[in-house]
């Protein structure tokens, strides 16, 4: 069709995967599509080969807002899909009233985003609730934004899904488990390198090879973990396709600064993926791979339990992954993880 479509999806990497089925469905139907991504999810722009992709900040700058405004003003879009809840985006339907805006909106006990007044200018919207259990996940609810006559792309046929580079595959073990280290997650549990080493040793009781990556934040503490991993574990350099063995830990490989594309490949090759709930879970779901999600939130009241059920209904409903709730007791936590992998 000749309609011009704009998709606003400058959010986190895991969130992008929740929108892929909708985006793929739109690509299958419309030839003229432009997609805005963020610095956090642009690494997965390979999905949108031959489509116009613009990268802006996750937190929109004034310049970003001006560019997006001028883009809409000058390019005669027929439909705009707001797939990330930036306050600025909800002002646009009020200004550009001749364009059909589609969006997911949010309701909690104390706040509506956007307000009921601004919702009047959305052509079509669906509601995610933060104050009660959702009947549909965020992923599935987005498909309801499609018009009745529009079919959705169940198998992502309209996306560019690359095959693993042979050079990368040659340096990976034939069978392995993947684990994602998250500094903030470990820090909240009060865990350090000693606890990490213990957890890896427990995983090795069931799997011969363990591959793990790290999301390095820009602070000295997390950089210390990076140095520790490079000193004490074998390394797979996914950029230069090199494998460096550590004599003590020859079968545990640190994926040093792995990029989005190679992480995409590696998670498909693994036997099972283990990580804090988030991007790894969404990637695993895309690949139809087993995944064990880790949670570390505190439960003090029944209200806390209900709040987490609401969150689960928004992000994880229908994914059918196993999960564990962890605390600072590393031995107890390791037993929980071992049971499910």
Image (cartoon, rainbow, N blue to C red):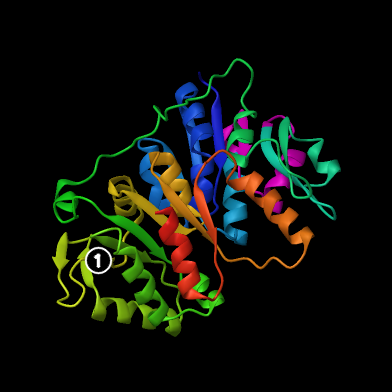
On the picture, is 272 further left or further right than 309? left
Residue 95 colored magenta?
yes
The mark total stands at 1
Left or right of 213, for residue 163: left
Magenta stretch: includes residue 296: no
Secondary element at image label 1: strand
Residue 332: percent from left, percent from top: 50, 70
* Image quarter of residue 158: top left
Residue 41 visible in the displayed image: no
In the depicted structure, whether residue 228 falls above or below residue 209: below
Tell me: residue 90, above or below residue 152: below
Q: Quadrant of residue 150?
A: top right
Query: Residue 220: x and y, percent?
Result: 43, 84
Near-viewer residue (238 or 252): 252
Q: Residue at x 48, y 79 (%)?
A: 191
Extreme top residue here?
149
Q: Residue at 78% of width from left, 59% of height from top?
A: 302
Q: Residue at x 61, y 53 (%)?
A: 66
Question: Where on the picture, by quarter, is residue 193?
Answer: bottom left
Boundaries of the magenta span:
73-100
Quadrant where the C terminus is found in the figure: bottom left
Q: Residue 48, position in %: x, y? A: 40, 38
**Residue 84: percent from the left, percent from the top?**
62, 47
Q: Residue at x 55, y 53 (%)?
A: 11
Q: Which residue is mark 1?
A: 253
The answer to whether residue 290 of the structure is visible from this angle is yes
Q: Nearer the viewer, residue 275 or 33?
A: 275
Mark 1 burial class by Cα count in 10 Å: few <14, some 14-19, many 20+: many
């Amino acid at each position: 069709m000749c309609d011009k479509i704009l998709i606003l999806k400058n959010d986190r990497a895991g969130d992008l995967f929740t929108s892929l089925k909708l985006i793929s469905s739109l690509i299958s139907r419309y030839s003229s599509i432009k997609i805005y991504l963020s610095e956090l999810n642009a690494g997965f722009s390979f999905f949108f080969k031959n489509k116009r992709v613009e990268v802006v900040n996750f937190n929109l700058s004034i310049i970003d807002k001006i560019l997006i405004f001028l883009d809409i003003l000058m390019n005669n879009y027929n439909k705009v899909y707001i797939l990330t809840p930036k306050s600025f985006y909800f002002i646009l339907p009020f200004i550009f009233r001749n364009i059909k805006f589609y969006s997911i909106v949010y309701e909690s006990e104390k706040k509506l985003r956007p307000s009921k007044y601004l919702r009047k200018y959305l052509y079509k919207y669906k509601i995610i609730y933060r104050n009660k259990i959702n009947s549909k996940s965020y992923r599935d609810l987005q498909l309801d934004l499609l018009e009745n006559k529009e079919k959705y792309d169940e198998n992502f046929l309209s996306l560019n899904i690359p095959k693993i580079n042979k050079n990368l595959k040659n340096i990976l073990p034939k069978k392995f488990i993947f684990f994602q280290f998250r500094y903030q997650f470990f820090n909240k549990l009060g865990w350090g390198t000693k606890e990490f080493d213990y957890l890896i040793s427990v995983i090795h009781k069931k799997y011969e090879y363990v591959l793990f990556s790290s999301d390095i934040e820009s602070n000295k503490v997390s950089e210390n973990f990076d140095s520790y991993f490079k000193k004490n574990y074998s390394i797979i350099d996914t950029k230069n396709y090199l494998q460096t063995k550590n004599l003590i830990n020859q079968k545990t490989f640190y994926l040093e600064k792995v990029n989005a594309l190679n992480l995409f490949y590696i998670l498909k090759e693994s036997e099972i993926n283990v990580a804090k709930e988030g991007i790894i879970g969404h990637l695993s779901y895309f690949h139809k791979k087993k995944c064990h999600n880790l949670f570390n939130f505190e439960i003090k009241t029944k209200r806390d339990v209900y709040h987490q059920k609401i969150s689960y209904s928004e992000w994880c409903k229908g994914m059918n992954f196993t999960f564990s709730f962890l605390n600072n007791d590393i031995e107890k936590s390791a037993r929980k993880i071992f049971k499910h992998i």
